[in-house]
Image (cartoon, grey):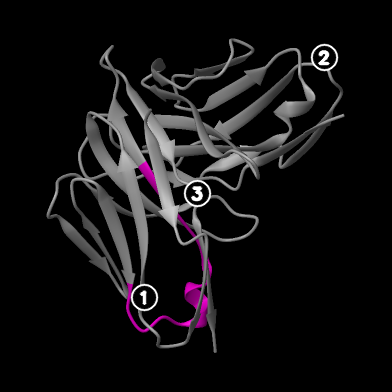
Amino acid sequence: EDQVTQSPEALRLQEGESSSLNCSYTVSGLRGLFWYRQDPGKGPEFLFTLYSAGEEKEKERLKATLTKKESFLHITAPKPEDSATYLCAVRAVTTSGTYKYIFGTGTRLKVLA
Amino acid sequence: KAGVTQTPRYLIKTRGQQVTLSCSPISGHRSVSWYQQTPGQGLQFLFEYFSETQRNKGNFPGRFSGRQFSNSRSEMNVSTLELGDSALYLCASSFSAPSGSNYGYTFGSGTRLTVV
């Protein structure tokens, strides 16, 4: 069964304390892995798309990496404004040639000043 | 630059009724997708439209339907509402076709539907 699992469920960091969020997946026909950030009461905000193992992308304090089984979102020297829920999603091709999107349940990040 | 606009923001309906939600994508975006978000199930994909055609569909019953107009605006309809349909319904748009590379979606703030 296709599955996306994010860990940890929740993470509290001190400002400046770097860490990584994990997204492990078991899908066949991967056609992209997405990272989003979601603030309370708002829709998700797109961060990155990764397509192949070994690919890396960076944006400010965030860096996403991808292997054949998992993706990591590295947060370097986080600030309180980085507090949010981080969602991972995969897009996979089905046997009929269409796409399906599967989301993880997210990691709730709290950065303390 | 205007973002993705969803209307209404909040909605209360009675079980058995039907509801139509609206989504206006970012100007120039031709892909529109819909998602259901609940505390228990998280975000679940409903369907995706590109150039007025449904390209991809999630595992939801036929009571959930949608369409896209020539101006890329999209509507989602849920018929015979059930209590379990209470959720935040999110719409997202993208410039690229679903098979495009290196693209992401821009989400709206959602419509919160409560079924009583």
Residue drawn at x 28%, y 54% as measured from the top left: A71
Q: Which of marks 1 and 3 is in front?
A: 1
Residue drawn at x 52%, y 59% as measured from the top left: A9
Q: Hey, which quadrant is residue A27 in on the image?
A: top left
**x and y percentages locating residue B115 in the rendered image:** 81, 29
Is disc 3 surrounded by few (<14), some (14 to 19) or many (20+) residues within 10 Å?
some
Give, as a single range, the part of the protein colored magenta.
A75-89
Residue labelled with disc 3: B3
Q: Is residue A60 left or right of residue B25?
A: left
- Residue A62, placed above or below residue B93: below
Q: B76 or A32, which is in the foreground?
A: A32
Is disc 1 surrounded by few (<14), some (14 to 19) or many (20+) residues within 10 Å?
some
Mark 1 near mark 3, Cβ–Cβ under 8 Å? no
**Mark 1, chain letter?**
A
Q: Quadrant of the N terminus of chain A?
A: top left
Q: Which element is circle 1 on? A: strand
Q: Which element is circle 3 on? A: loop
Q: In this view, does A1 lie to the left or right of A12?
A: left
Q: Which element is circle 2 on? A: loop
Whether residue A106 appears in this view of the structure is: yes
Asked if marks 2 and 3 fall on the same chain, the answer is: yes
Question: Identity of the amino acid at label 2?
Answer: Gly
Question: Identity of the amino acid at label 3?
Answer: Gly
- Residue B42, placed above or below residue A55: above
From mark 2 to mark 3, how far is it between C-alphas? 32 Å
Residue B16 shows which numbered tag? 2
**Mark 3, chain letter?**
B
From mark 1 to mark 3, how far is it between C-alphas? 31 Å
Residue labelled with disc 1: A19
- Residue A2, placed above or below residue A5: above
Q: In this view, does A48 lie to the left or right of B34?
A: left
Q: In this view, does A9 lie to the left or right of B28?
A: right
